Amino acid sequence: MPNSEKILVVEDETTILRVLGTILTANGYQVITAETGQQAVTMASSHCPDLILLDLGLPGMDGLEVIKKLRQWSGTPILVVSARDEEDEKVRAFDLGADDYITKPFGTSELLARIRAARRHANQLAAERAMVSSSYEYKDFKIDFERRTVTIAGKEIHLTQNEYKIVERLARQPGRVLTYTTLLHDIWGPYKGDDNQILRVNMANIRRKLEKNPAEPRYILTENGVGYRMADGE
Ligand code: CA
C-alpha cells in the first residue's frame, strides 16, 4: 500500500544507510538522509519528516545529543537504532524523548512494524491533545479516567491510590515505554530519588490484581532495566 510519509534516516555508515533507504523506499516511504548529527537537526527542521530513524553512534554530535536538540522544538517520533543493547543508553534515549528503540541487527518486518507503531502513537497523541480521552481499553481491560475505575471483563478491580496512578499514567500513553525515573517522579514527586524498589512492589501488587498469570503479564509489559509499557491494540 503506497503512502507518502517521509522518513529521515540518520546513519553514518553508508552501506547501512543505503540498505535502510532501499527497504523504506520499497515499502512506499519517502526517504531523506543525514550522515551526521548536525545534518540530522538541520534536515529535521527544513524537511519536517513524519518520523526520524536515528542511529546513536554518530561522529561529532551523537544521537543522544540529537534527541535533546530535536525535542526542544519537535514532537516528531524518533525511533532509535543502535548496535549496542545497553540499558543505560536506552534509558537516556527514552528520558530525552525517544519514542522507541530497535537494536541491530533487526529484520525488515520488525523495522516496519516499529515504524508503524511509532507513527500510530504519534497520531494517538495528537488526537488526545485535541480531545483528552476519557478511557482506555485493551481486550477486556478497561480504565475509566473520569470515574477512576478499573475493570476486567466488567468486574471492578480495587487498586490503591498509588496503584491507580501508575496504571493511569501508563494507560494515558499506551504502547509508550515510561522509564522507572519518569514513573517515580510522576507518582511520588521529584524528590523520590532513583530507588525503584517501591515501584516494583506496587507493580507486583497491580499485576497480582490484574493479570491471570503475573509472571506473563498481558496488560502492563516490562521493558527490562528500562521501565514499563501499557499494551496497545493494533
Ligand atoms: Ca553509527
Image (cartoon, rainbow, N blue to C red):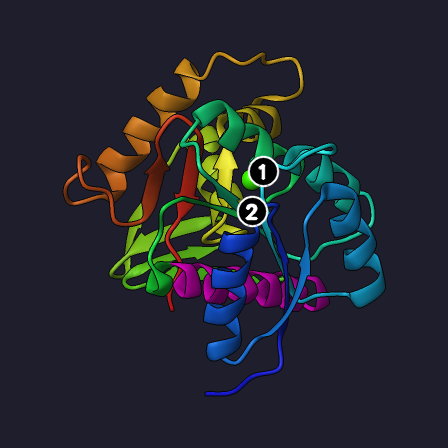
Residue displayed at 81% across by 43% down: 72
* CA separation in Å, label 2 and label 1: 12 Å
Residue displayed at 53% across by 61% down: 18
Magenta-drawn stretch contains 125: yes
Ligand 1 image-quadrant field? top right
Relative to 122, residue 70 above or below:
above
The quarter of the rendered structure image containing the C terminus is: bottom left
Q: Nearer the viewer, residue 133 or 173?
A: 173
Asked whether mark 2 lies closer than 8 Å to ligand 1, one says yes
Neighbourhood count class around disc 1 (C-alpha, 10 Å): few under 14, some 14–19, many 20 upward: many
Relative to 89, residue 49 above or below:
below
Farthest-out residue, front: 15
The quarter of the rendered structure image containing the N terminus is: bottom left
User: Mark 2 falls on what kind of element?
Assistant: loop
Say what amino acid the circle numbered 2 marks.
Glu
Residue with the mark numbered 1? 56
Q: Quadrant of residue 103?
A: top left
Residue displayed at 77% across by 57% down: 44
Asked if residue 154 shows in the view, the reply is: yes
Specify whether 83 is left or right of 190: left
Specify whether 180 is left or right of 204: right
Q: Nearer the viewer, residue 211 or 12?
A: 12
User: What's drawn in magenta, residue-wise?
Assistant: 111-131
Asked whether mark 1 lies closer than 8 Å to ligand 1, one says yes
User: Mark 1 falls on what kind of element?
Assistant: loop
Residue with the mark numbered 2? 13
